[in-house]
Image: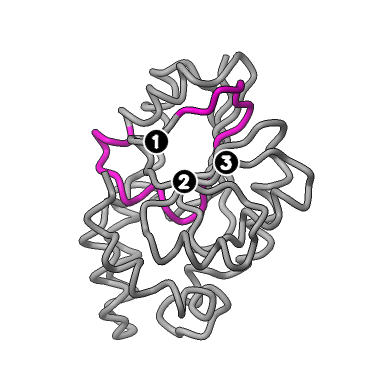
C-alpha cells in the first residue's frame, strides 16, 4: 500500500522541494507546471478535505490558504516533520491511502498529488471503494499524478526517456505502479464516480471524480 517507499521518502524529505522546482534534469518534465497543478487541485477542493501524501506540504499550503479544513495523511516520518515545521497549523497524521484514521466530520474532498501511483491497481481499487463510502453525493476525489494514456503510450514514453539516458526516471517509471487512464476510469466508474482526465504536462493528468 505504498509503504514500501517510506525509506525513499524519508531520505528525500530535505531535497524534495529542490526536485519539484526543476533542479533535477531527469524529473524536470515530470514536475513541469508544478505550482499551477497544485493550485488547480486546491481550486477544485471544497469543505473538509483529506490530503493523502502530504510530503513537504506544498499542496497543503494552497489548501490552507483557501481556508479549507485540511487533514493531512503522510506515512513518512521525515516528511511529516518537514511539513509540520513549514506549516505548524496543519493537522497531519501517520497513515496512507488505505490505512488512515477517518475524521469524525463529513469529508467533501479527497486530494493528492504525485502519489497515487505508489499503489498497485488492486490497491487503487480498494482505496477508491473506501473513498466512495466516505464521500457524500457530490463529493470529489481530485488527484494529479503521472498516468499513461494507454499501454502503447507507456512503452513510447519510457523509450523516449531511455533514449535521453534518464536511467533513474526510467527505473521509476518501470518499477512503481503507474497505471493507464482506462484502468483508473474503470475503477472510478465501478465505484459510482463520474471521472474526467485533463493532461497538465507531458506526464501528469488532473483526475477529477465526482460521486454520483
Identify whether 24 is placed above or below 54.
below
Identify whether 7 is placed above or below 204.
below
Percent coordinates x, y for residue 57 in the rendering = 57, 60
Q: Are marks 1 and 3 in contact (CB under 8 Å)?
A: no
Identify whether 42 is placed above or below 101.
below
Q: Is residue 190 left or right of residue 158?
A: right
Q: Nearer the viewer, residue 35 or 102?
A: 102
Q: Which residue is mark 2?
A: 93
Q: Which residue is mark 1?
A: 100
At horizontal 58% and vertical 67% (from top left) the residue drawn is: 85
Q: Residues within 10 Å of mark 1 (few under 14, many from 20)?
A: some
Q: Which residue is mark 3?
A: 71
Helix, strand or loop at mark 2: strand
**Quarter assignment of residue 153:** bottom left
Q: Which residues fall within the magenta stretch?
A: 102-124
At horizontal 58% and vertical 77% (from top left) the residue drawn is: 21
Identify whether 68 is placed above or below 20.
above
How far separated are the C-alphas under marks 3 and 2?
A: 8 Å
How far separated are the C-alphas under marks 1 and 3?
A: 11 Å
How far separated are the C-alphas under marks 2 and 1?
A: 8 Å
Amino acid at each position: 500500500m505504498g509503504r514500501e517507499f517510506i525509506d525513499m521518502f524519508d531520505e528525500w524529505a530535505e531535497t524534495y522541494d529542490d526536485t519539484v522546482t526543476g533542479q533535477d534534469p531527469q524529473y524536470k518534465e515530470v514536475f513541469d507546471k508544478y505550482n499551477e497543478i497544485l493550485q488547480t487541485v486546491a481550486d477544485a477542493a471544497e469543505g473538509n478535505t483529506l490530503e493523502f501524501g502530504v510530503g513537504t506540504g506544498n499542496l497543503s499550503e494552497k489548501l490552507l490558504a483557501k481556508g479549507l479544513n485540511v487533514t493531512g495523511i503522510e506515512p513518512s516520518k521525515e516528511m511529516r516533520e518537514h511539513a509540520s515545521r513549514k506549516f505548524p497549523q496543519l493537522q497531519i497524521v501517520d497513515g496512507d491511502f488505505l490505512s488512515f484514521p477517518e475524521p469524525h466530520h463529513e469529508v467533501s474532498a479527497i486530494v493528492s498529488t504525485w502519489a497515487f501511483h505508489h499503489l498497485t491497481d488492486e490497491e487503487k481499487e480498494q482505496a477508491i471503494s473506501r473513498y466512495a463510502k466516505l464521500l457524500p453525493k457530490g463529493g470529489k476525489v481530485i488527484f494529479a499524478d503521472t498516468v499513461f494514456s494507454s499501454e502503447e503510450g507507456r512503452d513510447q514514453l519510457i523509450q523516449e526517456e531511455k533514449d535521453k539516458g534518464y536511467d533513474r526516471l526510467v527505473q521509476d517509471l518501470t518499477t512503481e505502479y503507474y497505471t493507464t487512464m482506462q484502468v483508473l476510469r474503470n475503477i472510478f466508474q465501478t465505484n459510482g464516480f463520474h471521472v474526467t482526465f485533463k493532461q497538465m504536462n507531458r506526464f501528469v493528468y488532473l483526475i477529477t471524480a465526482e460521486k454520483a
